[in-house]
Image (cartoon, rainbow, N blue to C red):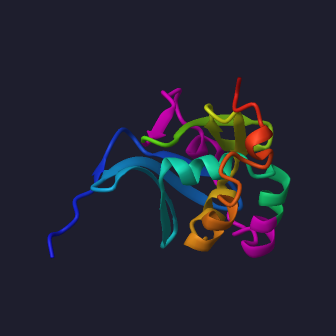
């Protein structure tokens, strides 16, 4: 079996608060571009289609699921550790999908904005929600992709 080579690109983005400490980074695999999300000893690699499916989730519902399954770690992170310098957005794409990701600071703390510009959806997720995503299985994304154009289906305007 030939070993798989993964190439990282750019500096990783670290998002941390009292609930979780997460690192995201664009990587290239033999299967294409992915966003790798790491939290503790958990990690997941999401392609552009999976990221688009995250973008159309309800942010409050996602936060609630994450809070139920991942209680706060209880160790606060210094704000200077969580804040990153201005940086270019990360783009993860394939022949079928496009996702743009940007680290932002909000009054609630650091967030990763995940946008599906072709579909007209976006979501802002915090460290806990990102950590929760690392624990998801393929079935979660399969369920989300039952409506491949988002919750509005074919009736959604797809950003137009």
Image side of residue 150 versus residue 44, left or right: right
Q: Residue furthest left?
A: 2
User: From which residue to which does the magenta span run?
Assistant: 65-94
Examine the rendering and report whether any part of residue 76 can be seen: no
Q: Farthest residue in the front direction? A: 154
Give the camera-side residue of 80 and 34. Answer: 34
Image quadrant in which the C terminus is located? top right
Q: Which of the pair 72/76 is nearer the observer? A: 72
The image quarter in which residue 29 lies? bottom left
* 34 horizontally vs 121: left or right: left
| In-front residue for pair 38/54 | 54
Can you say whether 62 is above or below 32 in the image? below
Q: Is residue 144 above or below residue 14?
A: below
The reply to whether residue 111 is visible in this rendering is yes
Is 91 covered by the magenta stretch?
yes
Q: Residue furthest top?
A: 160
- Expressed as whole percent of the image width and height from the top left, the position of residue 105 reads 68, 35
Magenta run includes residue 16: no
At horizontal 80% and vertical 37% (from top left) the residue drawn is: 107
The N terminus appears in which quarter of the rendering? bottom left
Quarter occupied by residue 143: bottom right
Point 43% across, 43% down: residue: 94
**Going by the image, does 9 lie left or right of 101?**
left
Residue 135 spot, x, y in % from top left? 59, 72
Q: Quadrant of residue 12?
A: top left
Compare residues 136 and 1 and report the one nearer the observer: 1
Q: Residue at x 66, y 36 (%)?
A: 119
Residue at 80 percent of width and 44 percent of height? 152
Q: How many marks?
A: 0
């Amino acid at each position: 079996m030939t070993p798989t080579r993964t190439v990282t690109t750019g500096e990783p983005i670290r998002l941390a608060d009292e609930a979780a400490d997460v690192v995201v980074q664009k990587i290239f695999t033999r299967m294409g571009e992915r966003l790798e999300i790491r939290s503790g000893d958990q990690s997941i690699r999401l392609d552009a289609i999976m990221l688009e499916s995250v973008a159309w989730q309800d942010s409050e519902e996602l936060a609630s699921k994450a809070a139920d399954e991942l209680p706060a770690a209880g160790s606060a992170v210094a704000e200077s550790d969580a804040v990153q310098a201005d940086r270019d957005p990360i783009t993860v794409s394939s022949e079928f999908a496009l996702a743009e990701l940007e680290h932002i600071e909000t009054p609630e703390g650091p967030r990763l904005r995940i946008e599906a510009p072709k579909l007209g959806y976006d979501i802002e997720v915090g460290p806990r929600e990102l950590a929760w995503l690392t624990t998801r299985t393929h079935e979660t994304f399969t369920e989300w992709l039952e409506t491949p154009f988002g919750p509005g289906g074919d009736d959604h305007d797809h950003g137009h």
